[in-house]
Each structure stands twice: as structure tokens, then as C-alpha cells.
């Protein structure tokens, strides 16, 4: 499976040097079951308006997990029903303190295919890349089809915010030797060849660093002092830079700052801070649950705020690995907007980017496609309700690029549905839709909070969604909500299989593959169950319980998955 570590590190280092040079120049387990489901495919006419695969030499071939990259030349454009003016979108571009009336970027952003997003072996951001299509890396060598907890440790809390929250996915990285040696990693871990470092932001305000294989700390944590809800981003160029948001601006009942931070991973110094209480924002809520992505060729970060602003950040990074120094001197350009339906601004999902087009959905259910080089909306549509689930993008052919998205049951109230949709990324046209009736709870939303799996290999015709609160029962005087895990045919939206989960979940499923292309799924739930599921059939193969609600989402490197619970426990689990 792997080349030697020496070969891997030489290859990573070569690509890292190229990037530097380029930048310088420009419980109830037994009751879960498989059930057959109904199909709610709709006709298009019923549209509703209301890494490089080799990953820097680490893997000899990732072909069973990834089709050959396609980069269509076609660009998005609106059709009559998705024109931004249909939803009365008004927008501004802000640079410094000035509103720019006819903005055009003085350099061109163009993201690559998802397989070429990162030079680093591992998972660098929420769902892995700019298409948000994978939270696993490498191959799993699975023989017993069992799960085994191999290590755990406890983290803390701030006020009521305990353990690890939503989205709560760790990053898992194998650094090249030169970068590893200039960072503040403990000497014993620095000496370990092929160290795979887990980086986990949690609700106790700390970002933890530990060894994937044994769970032991690799360095001291970073402490921002306030709860972090989202998922960190590690710079995909292999630079020692860490990007993180913040979920809550309060500690011990006292208000505090809230914003987005960039840290040096050489010495943990904070290099830059975006104040979430942005004076240009139309909403005064400064959280950043979104996990940003970086255009490596132009040194530009794209991040979405819950204040209703999309930030494009020219980092102006200076990195000298020989001297062990790194700095940023960012220039910000902001996209802000209002619309006829955006009563509640703010973006909690992570932006998806195809070439120079960013896709995101706000808390009112407004889906937009925005050109990053002009900061103008290209098309928009109403997707019914608040959508925190991150979109997934799939390039199907030279002429077909699709978005998969699903909404919550929040603004709709007690008669609401979670609408799972496939949408044409070029025009915003609805391809198919499946409506799932969900229970309404104003304090704990139902519907889609999890992001989907885009199947590969033996499930390459599946899109898989975890939908929360599809039913409820009374148990020992308490209301217990159930959920469903749906495998849908990508082309039709028809159900292939459905797993009925006695306990619902906000956690995103993760797809894992053997070297011969056999698929498995990892799904966690609200009472601490971790399920191993056969991808093709939906059969539950094994379950272990971690003792508390899992609203975070796992990441998997080879055979080891990492996940945290609200019960202040972070675990490493081997897929055997």
C-alpha cells in the first residue's frame, strides 16, 4: 500500500518546495434495522423555486477510491428560475472600508479538482477538500469487520459546552520531516518516523494534538479560551498554518470576543484574527462554524461567517522552512448580501468550491453560486429551510457537475420535511428531490445536520444521507428521537436501502474502502453508538458504544478512526 516513509517524505518535501517557490513568485443497538423505503423522485419540470491521487507519493495508487479527474470547461450561468433578482438579492463587495461598485479581482482564483487540493497525506479540513467529498484517507485492511477502541483520553468543558460538538471533525496529517522538525512537537514524537498527527478543536476552547496510533499528546494544546464548534483547517500546501473558527463568545457567564484565527504551527503564535463582530456585517453574531479552504496557487483563504459575510483572504504568506519562520499579512475582501428570504443571515455549512465558484447556503435556506473573481452572485435558489449540512459537489462528466444538499426542519415548524436534493451546479436547476418527514424540536433541530457521502467504487451510484428525528417514542418518561440512514441512487433519488436508527444523529457518515474497492460506512449516534455498516447493502456489521452523545463527525486514516463525544471523551477506534 505505502511506499517507504523516506520516499513519501522526499516526495512531500519536493511538492512543498514547489508550492513555496510558486507562492514566492506570485445501548439500543439490536433495534436498528434495514427497512425498505419509498421513492419520491420528481420530474425536472416540477422544479421548486419557493489530491493528486498519489497524495505526494504516500499512496502508490488511490484508483479504487477516485475516478480520473475531470475539469469541465463550462461555467455556471443562471436560468430564468434561478436568476438572483428573482429572490431580490442585493450585494456589496467591501475592500478595506470601501464598497467597490464594480469589483474585479486583480488575480484569478481557480481551485483544482478535489484530488489535487492538498499535497499532505491525510485529511486537512471538514470533509477533506474543496468538493467536501471525503473524510477518510488511504485504504482500510478489513478482515474481521469489527470495531475496537484502542485508546481514549478526556478533554474538558466551558460552562454547558462539554467535550466535542458539531461539526467536530478532526484533521489527521502526516507531516514531511523538515516541517515536523521545525514545529514545537515533543522530541519523543518528533523522532517517530511517519508520525500521523491528529488535530482536534473542542468545546473546552482547546485544540489538541496527538498521535493517531497511540493517542498520546504530540505537543501542548492551543487554548483560545472559548468553545470551538467547527472543524479546523490545516494549510493544504503543507505549510505549518492552522485555521480555526469559534462557536461561543462566553465563558463563566461573561461575554468575550469571537472570531476566526490563524495560528503558526511552528510556535502556536496567533498570526491573524478576524473579528466576528464585523462592522460591515448585517447580522451581529460572530461565530465561525465553517471550515475554510485555501486556493494554494493564489495564497487565498475562503471562509464563511455566521455574520452573513463570505471572506476572501489574500494571505500574503511568507514561509522559510530553513529558518523555521512563517508569517501572514492578509488583505480581506468581503461579500455581503440581503435577499427576500434571508431573514436570518449566517452560514454554518462549509463552502464548496468548483474552479472560481463558491456554493453555500444560509440560515434562511438561500443557496447561492458566487463567482469568486467578481464577487457577484451567478444563480440562487430557495432550498426551503435552514441548511447547516455541507453541500457535496460531484463532477460527473465534462458537461455535468452536481450538488447534493439537504435542509433541516427549523423554520418550517411542526409540519416540516427535510428535502434531499440533487441540483445542477451550473444552473441551479433541480434534478430530483426526496422529502423526509421529520419531528420538530425548536431546541434541537431535526432533518439534515450531517453531510452526505458521495459513494465511490462498489457504491459509486449512491449518495448517502443521515437524517435526524424521523420519528419519536416515549421511553422512561423521556422523548427519544429516531433517525434514518438513506442510500439513494444518484441518478434517480430512489432509495436503495435504508437503515433505521433507534437514536438520531447529527454526525456525518464516513465512507471507508479496502484496496479492492469494497465499501464500509461509519455512522455515530446521539447515545454514543458507533456503527460499522457494509456500504453496498446497509447491513450493520458491528457496533460499539462510547457512552455519550456523538454529534461530531469522525475522520479515518487507513484503519483508525478518531471521534469525540459530548461526554468529554476522544477515542481512537480500529476497524479490524
Image (cartoon, rainbow, N blue to C red):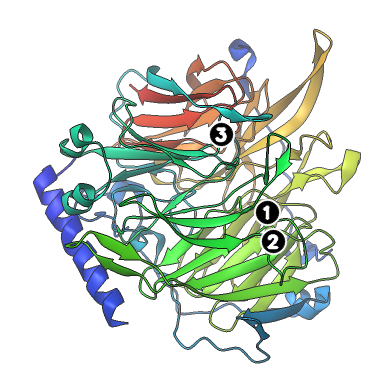
* Mark toward the start of the polypeptide (2 vs 1): 2
Residue 463 pos. (x, y %): 55, 46
Q: Is residue 198 left or right of residue 369?
A: left
Q: Quadrant of residue 15?
A: bottom left
Q: Is residue 391 visible?
A: no
Q: Nearer the viewer, mark 1 or mark 3?
A: 3
- Per the model, the C-alpha gap separating discs 3 and 2 is 22 Å
**Which of the two residues, 54 or 284, is positioned nearer the viewer here?**
284
Mark 1 = which residue? 421
Q: Are marks 3 and 2 in contact (CB under 8 Å)?
A: no
Query: Element type at marker 1?
Result: strand
Which numbered dot is residue 277?
2
The quadrant of the rendering that contains the N terminus is: top left
- Per the model, the C-alpha gap separating discs 1 and 3 is 35 Å
Residue 498 pos. (x, y %): 62, 31
**Residue 152 to residue 278: above or below:** above
Q: Badge 3, how many Cα within 10 Å: few under 14, some, many 20+?
A: many
Residue 536 pos. (x, y %): 47, 34
The quadrant of the rendering that contains the C terminus is: top left
Residue most extreme to the bottom: 102
Q: Badge 2, how many Cα within 10 Å: few under 14, some, many 20+?
A: some
Q: Residue at x 86, y 70 (%)?
A: 340
**Residue 519 to residue 294: above or below:** above
Q: Residue at x 34, y 58 (%)?
A: 118
Residue most extreme to the top: 476
- Callout count: 3
Q: Quadrant of residue 495?
A: top right
Q: Badge 1, how many Cα within 10 Å: few under 14, some, many 20+?
A: many
Mark 3 = which residue? 204
Q: Is residue 18 left or right of residue 509?
A: left
Amino acid at each position: 500500500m505505502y511506499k517507504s516513509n523516506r520516499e513519501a517524505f522526499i516526495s512531500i518535501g519536493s511538492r512543498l518546495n514547489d508550492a513555496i517557490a510558486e507562492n514566492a513568485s506570485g445501548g439500543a443497538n439490536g433495534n436498528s434495522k434495514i427497512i425498505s423505503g419509498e421513492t419520491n423522485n420528481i420530474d425536472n419540470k416540477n422544479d421548486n423555486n419557493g489530491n493528486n491521487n498519489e497524495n505526494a507519493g504516500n499512496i502508490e495508487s488511490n484508483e479504487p477510491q477516485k475516478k480520473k479527474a475531470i475539469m469541465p470547461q463550462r461555467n455556471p450561468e443562471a436560468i430564468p428560475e434561478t436568476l438572483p433578482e428573482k429572490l431580490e438579492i442585493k450585494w456589496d463587495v467591501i475592500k478595506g472600508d470601501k464598497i467597490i461598485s464594480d469589483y474585479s479581482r486583480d488575480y484569478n482564483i481557480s481551485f483544482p479538482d478535489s484530488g489535487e487540493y492538498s499535497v499532505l497525506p491525510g485529511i486537512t479540513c471538514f470533509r477533506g477538500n474543496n468538493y467536501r467529498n471525503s473524510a477518510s484517507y488511504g485504504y482500510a485492511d478489513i478482515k474481521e469487520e469489527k470495531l475496537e477502541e484502542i485508546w481514549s483520553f478526556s478533554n474538558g468543558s466551558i460552562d454547558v459546552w462539554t467535550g466535542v460538538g458539531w461539526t467536530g471533525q478532526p484533521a489527521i496529517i502526516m507531516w514531511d520531516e523538515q516541517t515536523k522538525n521545525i514545529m514545537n512537537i515533543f522530541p519523543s514524537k518528533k523522532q517517530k518516523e511517519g508520525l500521523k498527527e491528529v488535530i482536534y478543536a473542542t468545546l473546552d476552547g482547546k485544540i489538541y494534538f496527538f498521535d493517531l496510533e497511540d493517542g498520546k499528546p504530540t505537543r501542548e494544546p492551543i487554548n483560545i479560551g472559548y468553545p470551538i464548534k467547527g472543524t479546523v483547517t490545516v494549510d493544504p500546501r503543507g505549510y505549518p498554518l492552522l485555521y480555526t473558527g469559534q462557536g461561543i463568545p462566553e465563558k463563566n457567564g461573561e461575554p468575550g470576543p469571537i472570531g476566526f484565527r490563524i495560528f503558526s504551527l511552528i510556535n502556536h503564535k496567533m498570526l491573524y484574527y478576524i473579528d466576528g463582530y464585523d462592522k460591515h456585517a448585517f447580522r451581529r453574531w460572530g461565530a465561525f462554524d465553517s471550515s475554510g479552504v485555501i486556493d494554494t496557487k493564489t495564497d487565498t483563504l475562503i471562509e464563511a461567517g455566521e455574520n452573513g459575510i463570505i471572506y476572501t483572504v489574500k494571505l500574503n504568506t511568507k514561509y522559510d522552512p530553513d529558518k523555521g519562520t512563517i508569517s501572514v499579512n492578509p488583505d480581506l475582501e468581503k461579500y455581503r448580501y440581503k435577499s427576500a428570504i434571508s431573514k436570518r443571515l449566517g452560514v454554518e455549512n462549509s463552502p464548496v468550491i468548483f474552479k472560481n465558484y463558491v456554493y453555500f447556503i444560509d440560515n434562511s435556506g438561500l443557496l447561492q453560486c458566487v463567482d469568486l473573481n467578481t464577487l457577484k452572485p451567478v444563480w440562487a435558489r430557495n432550498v426551503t429551510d435552514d441548511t447547516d449540512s455541507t453541500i457535496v459537489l460531484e463532477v460527473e462528466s465534462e458537461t455535468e457537475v452536481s450538488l447534493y444538499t439537504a435542509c433541516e426542519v427549523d423554520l418550517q415548524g411542526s409540519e416540516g420535511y427535510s428535502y434531499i436534493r440533487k441540483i445542477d451546479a451550473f444552473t441551479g436547476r433541480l434534478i430530483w428531490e426526496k422529502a423526509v418527514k421529520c419531528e420538530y424540536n425548536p431546541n434541537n433541530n431535526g432533518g439534515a445536520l450531517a453531510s452526505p457521502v458521495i459513494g465511490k467504487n462498489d457504491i459509486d451510484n449512491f449518495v448517502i444521507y443521515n437524517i435526524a428525528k424521523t420519528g419519536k417514542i416515549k421511553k422512561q418518561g423521556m422523548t427519544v428521537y429516531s433517525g434514518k440512514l438513506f442510500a439513494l441512487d444518484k441518478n434517480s433519488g430512489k432509495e436503495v436501502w435504508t437503515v433505521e436508527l433507534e437514536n438520531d444523529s447529527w454526525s456525518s457518515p464516513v465512507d471507508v474502502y479496502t484496496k479492492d474497492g469494497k465499501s464500509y460506512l461509519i455512522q455515530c449516534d446521539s447515545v454514543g453508538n458507533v456503527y460499522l455498516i457494509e456500504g453496498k447493502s446497509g447491513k450493520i456489521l458491528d457496533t460499539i458504544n462510547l457512552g455519550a452523545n456523538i454529534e461530531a463527525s469522525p475522520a479515518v486514516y487507513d484503519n483508525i478512526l478518531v471521534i469525540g463525544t459530548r461526554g468529554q471523551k476522544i477515542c481512537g477506534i480500529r476497524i479490524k
